[in-house]
Image: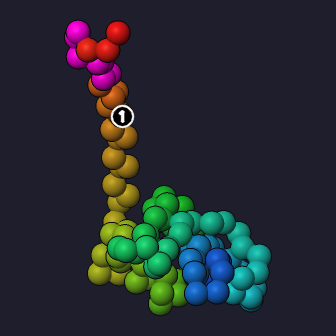
Amino acid sequence: MAVKIRLKRMGNRHRSFYRLIATDSRSPRDGRFLEELGFYDPMKDPAIVQIDGASVRKWIERGAQLSETARSLLKRAGILVQGKLVDAAPAPAPQPAEAPTPVFPPEGAGS
């Protein structure tokens, strides 16, 4: 079974977004897939590209072939540099949300 990493189109007419998937090369564009690897939303400004680098690495090491569009998205995300896989950078730690400062009425005002 030849595995390809390519895009699957989703969304409505004129509001499309894409999922990056690993699939059998014989399956249709929007058909069955083996694993979802990330997504690409070109409708946002700037376009959003979110890809799981470890999963992509796993499939490429198993012999999966990249489509041209998937290759360009991996380059944009920084996972592929000059045709070589780059070690996945650790995800940044989430910043703790700041507690809102309580607002008290001024002293002597009101009742």
Which residue ends up furthest to the left in the rendered image? Answer: 107
* Element on which disc 1 rests: loop
Q: Residue at x 46, y 64 (%)?
A: 50
12 on left or right of 74: right
**Residue 7 occupies which quadrant of the picture?**
bottom right
Position of residue 19 in the picture relative to residue 24 (left or right)? left
Q: Which region is colored magenta?
A: 102-108
Furthest residue toward front: 111
Q: Main secondary structure of the magenta part?
A: loop
**Identity of the residue drawn at 62% across and 66% down:** 36
Q: Which residue is mark 1?
A: 97
* Residue 97 in magenta stretch: no
Which amino acid, by three-letter code, is at mark 1?
Ala
Q: Is residue 82 visible?
A: yes
Please state if 56 lies on the left or on the right of 76 as rendered. Answer: right
Question: Which quadrant: the C terminus?
Answer: top left
